[in-house]
Amino acid sequence: MSTLPAKIVHCSISRHWKDVYDFAGKPENMPLWASGLASGLEPEGSDWVAYGPLGTVRVSFVPHNEFGVIDHTVTIESGLRVYNALRIVPNGDGCEVMFTLLKRPGMTDEQFAEDAAHVQRDLGALKSLMEK
């Protein structure tokens, strides 16, 4: 398999990276800024579950770590698994939040652009919350 087209969606936040990581890395806070999880996440075993238009969505997060990594795998009812690489990186007194978006097979350029715009809006919501 060849590599998929990718786009790094990022946002600068004027807040210490650890504060952003501590907030953004808590699954229970994600519905406050990640609109795809707006229905909320409920813990279920080692995963988290959301209920929405795509049915039951299971989200598995990497363990809390000292590197600002909030990678997570989203599995929808159809069995589609999407790996999401989300990083909080120090930048002076603030930080960069970076989400690696992969263009899945069968996705049109328009759908890929819409996904990137959606992620950008979510990161903007996180920025607004963290810079209050």
Image (cartoon, rainbow, N blue to C red):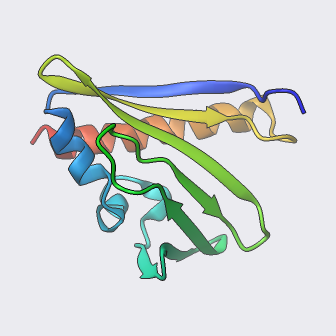
**Count of numbered tags:** 0
Nearer-the-camera pick, 11 or 117: 11
Compared across the picture, whether 34 is left or right of 84 comes to: left
- Can you say whether 120 is above or below 34 in the image? above
Residue farthest to the bottom, as pictured? 44
Image coords of residue 22 (percent x, y) = 22, 51
Quadrant of the frame with the C terminus? top left
Q: Quadrant of the N terminus?
A: top right
Q: Residue at x 58, y 71 (%)?
A: 58
Residue shown at 67%/52% (left/top)?
A: 82
Q: Residue at x 53, y 25 (%)?
A: 8
Residue 118: where, in percent of width, then height?
51, 42
Residue sitting at 67 percent across and 26 percent down? Answer: 6
Q: For residue 18, what is the image quadrant?
A: top left
Say above or below: 45 vs 70: below
Instruction: Looking at this view, name the residue that lies furthest to the top.
Output: 92
Foreground residue, 77 or 35?
Answer: 77
Taking the image as shown, residue 110 lies to the left or right of residue 16, namely right
Residue 69 is situated, as x and y percent measured from the top left of the image, at 40, 42
Image quarter of residue 38: bottom left
